[in-house]
Amino acid sequence: MDRRQFVQHAAALAAIPAVGRFAGLASPASSQAKPLTVNGARLNGWLAQFDQIGRTAGGINRVAYSEADLAGRAFTKQLFAQSGLQLRVDTAGNLLARVPGTDAARRPILIGSHVDSVTDGGNYDGPVGSFGAIEVARSLAEQKVRLRHPLEVVVWQNEEGGTIGSKIAVGLMTPADLDKVARSGKTVREGIGLIGGDVSRLNESVRKKGDIAGYIELHIEQGGLLEKANRQIGVVEGIVGLRWFEITITGFANHAGATPMDQRQDAMLAAAKFTVAVNEAIRGEAGRQVATVGRLNVSPNTTNVIPGQVVLTVDLRDLDQQKIDRFTATFEKLGRDIGEATRTTFAFNQLVNSTPALSDARIMDVVASSATALGLSHQRMPSGAGHDAQEVAHIAPMGMIFVPSVGGISHSPKEFSRADDITNGANVLMNAVVGLDRVL
Amino acid sequence: MDRRQFVQHAAALAAIPAVGRFAGLASPASSQAKPLTVNGARLNGWLAQFDQIGRTAGGINRVAYSEADLAGRAFTKQLFAQSGLQLRVDTAGNLLARVPGTDAARRPILIGSHVDSVTDGGNYDGPVGSFGAIEVARSLAEQKVRLRHPLEVVVWQNEEGGTIGSKIAVGLMTPADLDKVARSGKTVREGIGLIGGDVSRLNESVRKKGDIAGYIELHIEQGGLLEKANRQIGVVEGIVGLRWFEITITGFANHAGATPMDQRQDAMLAAAKFTVAVNEAIRGEAGRQVATVGRLNVSPNTTNVIPGQVVLTVDLRDLDQQKIDRFTATFEKLGRDIGEATRTTFAFNQLVNSTPALSDARIMDVVASSATALGLSHQRMPSGAGHDAQEVAHIAPMGMIFVPSVGGISHSPKEFSRADDITNGANVLMNAVVGLDRVL
C-alpha cells in the first residue's frame, strides 16, 4: 500500500464510531450469568478492510518491516485510537495499550497477537487475534465491564520472522538475532528502527517472570483438525516443541545407464527410503507428533546421473519433549541403517530446537467453560504452529483459543476463516478474560 | 585452449613421425597367425597430449562447437595427416578418411568414435576409440596389412549432445533437431557451420542401408562391470534402449506443524514411496535392466511446509524392448497405486524413447576371438550408455569393444582408463577389423 492508499484507509477508519474513555463500572459476569458477546460485525468489518493492505496477486504480503507492514501497523494504531485505547509503542516496536483494573496491586492480563504476514500469505493469521483483542477491550468498556486486573492489549511485531517482538519482551533476544535479515530484506535491527522502536533501549521492554498475570491469544488453527472434528473452538493445550534437522546424504554420482543396480551408491534412493521410514516411524505410534521432509535438494540433479548427494530437512514436532528426543534418536538410527544398506553416509545437523510451551491449566479451564457457556463445541488440541504465546510462556501462565481454518489451509492466499467462527473466538476470549480475572 | 596454446600443440604434433602413403601389400593374418598389435605407446601419447585441450579446473570441457572442441578437432585432423590418412570433412562436420581395399566392389568397414566431451568430463570417453581407430589404420599400413574392404576411419561430431554427427549420417536428423541448443550455447545448425559442415547439403552425408559393410567402435565402458569381474575386454551385445519419464506428483502444500499426519497430501512422501518402489521393481527381477530417479524438484521446498508438488524423472534402460515396455506399465501402475494411497496424483510425460540397438553376431564373434587370440580375458555385456554405434546400427551391422573404466567412473574429471587397457582395446580392434574383413 502506498501513502495515498493509506490516507484512504485512514479516512475509512475515521467513520468507525469511537467510544470514550472507560467511564462506567460493572461487576464481572458470574458463571451463571448470560455470557458476554463482542460486536462481531465490527470485528469482521475491520478484517475486511485490512484485507486490502498488502494484498498482491500472490496473496497478502505484509512481511515485517515492509511498506505494507508499516501500513498495516498504522491501520492497527487507528483501531486502538478509535476504540479508546491509549497506544504505547515499546522500544521493541510492539503496540501496547493498558486498561486499568480495579485492584492497583494486580499484574495485567495480556491479550493480543500480531499483524505481520508471511510472503504470499492470508489475512487471518495474526489479525484475527490482534483485532479480536482490541474488540474485546472495546466491548468490555462499552458494556461497562471492569476487571480487577489491568487489561493489556498487545500487537507483537514480526511474529512470522521468528516471534521477534515477543522474544524481546521476555528477554530472549540475542545481538545475533538482531542482525538476522528479515523477509523484507532488512535486518531486525533496521526494522525495529523503522517501526518506532529503539534497539539501544530494548531492555526497557523486557518483562520478568511475574510481571504478567496471564496471557491469552486468539488465533486461527492453521490446520484442519477442528473442521474435520466439526468443532467451533480449540482449547490449546500448548505449543509443540520443534526440532529441525538438515541431513546430508552422500553417495557417489555415476552414469545412470552404465552402472549396474548392485554397484550404486544412490543418494536419492537413500533419501527416499529415509523419507518413507521417518513417515512410518511417526505414524507407527499413537499420538499427535508430526514429522515432515519439506526441503530436498539433489546433486547433480540430472536425469541420467545417479544422484551423488541429497540434502533434506526433517521438521519434527510434539507437545512432549521426551517424544521429540526419542524420535530424534530413531531418525538418527534410521539414517545409520539406511546409510549402511545403501552404501551412503548420513550427516545430521540440527538447525532449530525449541521446547514445547504448555498452556496453563486454569486458562484452559476458563477457555473451555467460556465456550460451553456460549454453547460452542470445543476440544483440547496442541498447536502445531509456533506463536508469540510460546515466548510469553517463559514468564507467564499462557493459553490460546483456536478458531477453524477452512480446509486447514494457512500461510496461503487460500487461508480463510468464517466470520461466525471469528466472532465465536472473540466471544470466548472476552469471557475467558473475565473468567481469568476471577480465578487468578 | 586459446590460439597460442593450439600453436604449441600443433608444434608438438609435428614431432610425431608420419608414415607415407600405404605402399605395401600383405595378406590378412590368419586365425592361427600371431595376432597383430598397435603401437600402444604412440596411442597413449596422443591421449596424454589431448588431455591438455579443454582442461579446466572442473575437468575436460570440450563440449561440441566450443573453442576447445574446435581445438580438439584441429588436433585430431593433425593426427589423421601425420598418420597418412587423407582427411575429408563431410557436410555434417564428421571427420573421415578412407583407406582403399583390394576389392573395389566391397563396401567399407567403418571404425571410429568421437572427440567432444560433456561438461566437466574426462579425457577418455570418445578419444580412446577415435585415436584407437586412427592408430589401427596407421599400424595396418605400417605393417603392410591390406584389407579386401576399404577401411574408413570416422570421428563423429557432437556425440554428447545427442549423437548428432552419426544421426545425420544415417538420415535420422530432423530440422527441429538442428535448432536444438547445444551445451556450448550454439544451435546444432550454427555448430555445423562452425566446424566446416554445410546444413544446406546434409543429405550428401547420409549413408543408406548396405553402404557400410560393418562398424566397430572402441570405447571405455563407463561402468564398473569389467573392473568388478576382473575382465580386460567387454564384447558389447548391444546398446540398451532408453526411456525417460518426467513425472509430476501433485499433492497439497500445507503447514508442517498444524496438519495432522492423517490429513496430509504430501507429494514428497509419494515421490519417496515411488522412488523406493521403482528400485524394488527393477531389482526384483533377474537381468541387467536399470532405472534411476536422477532429477527431483520439490515445491515449495521449504522446511516447514508439506510439499505440494514434486517433479521427478525416471531413466529406464534395457537391451530388451519388451522389458522396457513391461516396466513402463509397472511404473505407471505404481504411480496410480501410490497416488491413491497418498491422496496425490501422478502425471507421466515421456521425454525420450530410444529402442535397443543390438550388436551383429559376427562382429561379436570376431571381437571375442580377437581378444582370445591376444590372451585377453573378456565377457559379453550390454552398453548402458548411448553411443554413435546405436545410430549406425540403423543401416549396418555394428559391434563395440569396451575397455575398463577405473572405479566405473565416467562423465567426470575422475574418468580414467589405464594405458595397458587402452592398448589392449586397440589391439582387439585391429584384429577384429582384420577378422571381419574375412568373414563379411
Image (spheres, coloured by chain):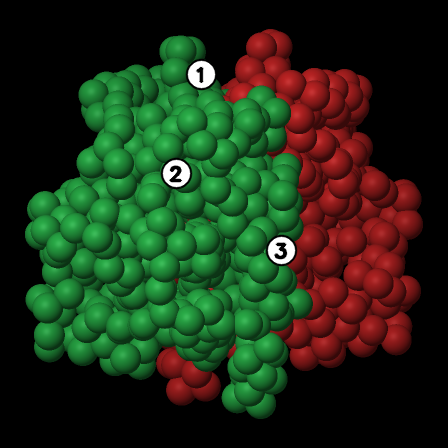
Chain colours: A green, B red
Query: In this rendering, is residue A341 above or below B199?
Result: above
Residue B232 coordinates in the image, percent (x, y): 43, 28
Q: Quadrant of residue B14?
A: bottom left
**Dot 1 amino acid type:** Arg
Q: Quadrant of residue A163?
A: bottom left
Marks 3 and 1 sit apart, C-alpha to C-alpha, by 42 Å
Query: How many numbered circles does the render carry?
Result: 3
Q: Kindly identify which chain the residue marked by label 2 belongs to.
A: A
Q: Nearer the N terminus, badge 1 or badge 2? A: 2
**Tag 3 near tag 2, CB within 8 Å:** no
Q: Quick one: label 2, few (<14), some, or many (20+) residues within 10 Å?
A: some
Q: Which residue is mark 3?
A: A41
Mark 3 secondary-structure assignment: helix
Residue at mark 3 shares a chain with residue at mark 1: yes
Q: Which residue is mark 1?
A: A283
> Which of the two discs, 3 and 1, sits closer to the camera?
3
**Tag 3 near tag 1, CB within 8 Å:** no
Position of the C terminus of chain A, as image quadrant, is top left
**Dot 2 amino acid type:** Ala
Q: Quick one: label 3, few (<14), some, or many (20+) residues within 10 Å?
A: few
Mark 1 secondary-structure assignment: helix
| In the foreground, B374 or B233 | B233
Marks 1 and 2 sit apart, C-alpha to C-alpha, by 45 Å
Residue B303 coordinates in the image, percent (x, y): 41, 44
**Tag 1 near tag 2, CB within 8 Å:** no
| In the foreground, A346 or A19 | A19
Residue B394 coordinates in the image, percent (x, y): 83, 41
**Residue B198 seen:** yes
User: Which residue is farthest bottom?
Assistant: A4
